[in-house]
Amino acid sequence: MSNHTDMKRLTRLSAILLQLQTRRIVNATDLAEKFAVSVRTIYRDIRVLDQIGVPIASIEGKGYSLAEGYKIPPVMFTEQEANALITAGQLVNLNKDSSLIRSYNDAVDKVKAVLNYTTKDKIALLPGRVAVSLASLEQPTSSSLSAIQDALTSFIVLRMTYLAAGKKESTERLIEPFAFYYSSRQQWTLIAFCRLRNDFRMFRLDRIVTVNTTHLKFSPHQLSLQEYLQEKEINFISPDKQLS
């Protein structure tokens, strides 16, 4: 086997390891498509990782998963990857939700911490060379996205005070957060089951006055986000296209 082939395989093994670390279950077919190799090649790669001591569990009919509690050493970012994150940060600032901006910036700081000094100097230059349109800064803001994300993934009911469009008085509602929709107007919208209306509703985050967690839990909804958006005839990018 040539050095070039060995390097390609080593790079792929590292990438598979990263996928195992970032996702609970990875599917051999999905990995094969991602790395443009055969499923049989992925099977061989998984065996190699297993042989060098990576505790990979095979879940019948689903795929592979890292054994719970196993930690992989911190990943070193390339200069190009760090540049992509810094540039994306300028776009994150357009979403107008302060909680998401704060969380993203905290994550980027952790990325910067593992870069070498030369790359850090280059990264420091980039933000001053990316401009944002002033028109995007005039839109309403919000600060509840991160808190709602936590409730959505933990299936916790939220108590929300909401001011609907054209209304002078707000209403208090118990909601079951379901999904988020980011519109072409650069606005975050929460899709949630509203117990007051006994139906799914869309709430603009900039119109949420207050939001607090409760001690109530709810069962995951069987409806998928794609089904909901198609039913409402809302254009969207599918998760597969977002990750491609």
Image: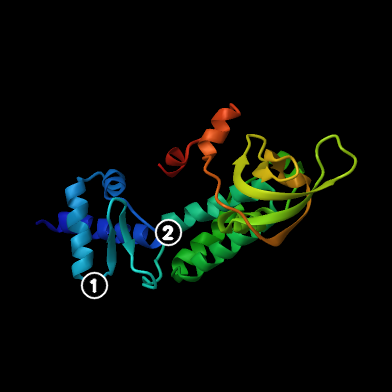
- The answer to whether residue 223 is above or below residue 210 is above
In the image, residue 123 lies at what x, y percent? Answer: 51, 60
What colouring does the structure picture have? rainbow
Q: Which residue is mark 2?
A: 79
- Residue drawn at x 47%, y 41% is 239
**Extreme-right residue of the structure:** 168
Element type at mark 2:
helix
Q: Quadrant of the N terminus?
A: bottom left
- The residue lying toward the viewer, choosing from 65 and 18, is 65
In the image, residue 17 lies at what x, y percent? Answer: 31, 62
- Residue drawn at x 27%, y 69% is 54
In the image, residue 214 lies at what x, y percent? Answer: 70, 61
Say which amino acid is labelled 2.
Answer: Glu
**Extreme-left residue of the structure:** 1
Q: Which residue is mark 1?
A: 53
Mark 1, other Cα within 10 Å: few <14 / some 14–19 / many ≥20: few
- The residue lying toward the viewer, choosing from 101 and 112, is 101
Number of the label disc, if any, that sits on residue 105: none
